[in-house]
Image (cartoon, rainbow, N blue to C red):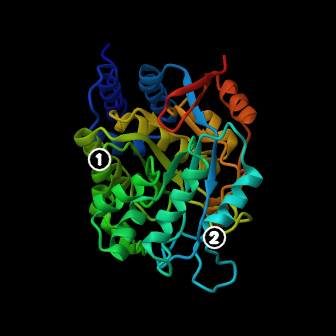
Amino acid sequence: MNVIIDSPDRRMAEIAEKVENGERLSREDGLFLYQSDDLLTIGQLANKVNLRKNGKNVYFVQNMSLYFTNVCEEHCAFCHFRRDEGEAGSYTLTPSEMLTYISENFHPDIREFHISQGHNPHVPFQYYVDALRTLKQHYPQVSIKAHTAAEIDFFARISGLSYKEVLRTLMDVGLDTLPGGGAEILTERYRKKMRVEKADTNQWLDVHRSAHELGMKTHATMLYGSIETLEERIEHMALLRDLQDETDGFLVFIPNSIQPASASAGIRRRVPAVDELKTIAISRLMLDNFPHIKAYFINMGIKVTQLAFQFGASDAHGTIVKERISHAAGAQSPDGVTKEDLVWLIKGAGRVPVERDTFYNVVQTYN
């Protein structure tokens, strides 16, 4: 008797064959995976790809998040971190004030400063240059991951410099890599609807292209779970994949689920865990030329992050010390964790914790 396989099963089998043979998935494949409810098969396929690339290693870095200013000229609909100049809760720290904060929280094993902040038009570009120079002078052993592509575009506008001139200036005083923020969803429909007034899709990509051409390795993110379509998520990944084909400059992709306005917001205001795991897995399958997919525990929560290591994620981010942006928007996770917590988390998923530096050089493996 002939057995007729229904169309979804046949399509999944075709995708599985592509994965087995190392063939690139199409946009249509990615959309099918998002529309499928076969989460475990999607996760198994992503896990297979990740094991090929990284074995059972899951990486983390001992880092500290820094925020020089929350004053911002933009009014992105999803942001609850920004403030206007003079508004209650607004701040712009001097370099010496930041050094005081660091001294109160620093320990010798911190290898990375991760700097995120507002687009503050009330200080000149030189303020940002001096801030990085001061950090590097006092902590030369620590890598500086600072300034999203949207910030680089902002600096170019207020300084009159090109992207490469801005980047060279910052690199000269200590900038080592760019974080992936400001990407949100790389389609103009989304950016208009969500009032993303900063760098547009092409500008965001051009900043990273410029950084890669200068020899810098950078990061890429996606902020999902609001008004974007599934097609837009896949288009976002495809644009990043195309740029990686061109430059090979991205270290990692970080899909971040959007946070509600308050930590007390109900579950209907939060991205479902199934969507978070599916997005990790589809990211791993679509971004075949990216070395790593990061599970960001700040947005996903600790337990979903642990599951993500079985769904294609090979990076657990870092210790952070005190995260502010997602927590300003209602994240319920801890605002930082210890090295011991991360080691426990990774081992609990049956993986091997690997402490790294910013560029995935191995510091220590915890067998």
Q: Upstream in the sequence, badge 1 or badge 2? A: 2
Local crowd at mark 1 within 10 Å, few (<14), some, or many (≥20)? Answer: some
Q: Is residue 352 visible?
A: no
Q: Position of residue 348 (x, y in %)?
A: 70, 26
Left or right side of 218 for 295: right
Horizontal and vertical percent for residue 358? Answer: 51, 39
Q: Mark 1 and 2 residues: CB-CB less than 8 Å, in contact?
A: no
Question: At x 43% / y 51%, what residue is drawn?
Answer: 178
Farthest left residue?
Answer: 246
Q: Residues within 10 Å of mark 2 (few under 14, many from 20)?
A: some
Type of amino acid at the residue the image marks with label 1: Leu
Q: Could you tell me how many numbered marks the image carries? A: 2
* Farthest top residue in view: 1
Q: Quadrant of residue 95?
A: bottom right
Up-down: is 10 above or below 337? above
Residue at 30 percent of width and 23 percent of height? 22
Disc 2 secondary structure class: loop
Q: Where is residue 18, by image quadrant?
A: top left
Tell me the tag on residue 227.
none
Q: Residue at x 61, y 48 (%)?
A: 300
In the picture, the quarter occupied by the C terminus is top right
Q: Give me the residue at 37% from left, 67% from top.
A: 190
> Which residue is the extreme one toward the bottom?
86
Side of 284 relative to 270 (left or right) = left
Kind of residue at badge 2: Leu
Up the image or down, 311 lies above or below 72; here it is above
Element under label 1?
loop
- For the N terminus, the quadrant is top left
The CA span between labels 1 and 2 is 30 Å
**Residue at the spot of label 2:** 93
Residue 214: mark: 1
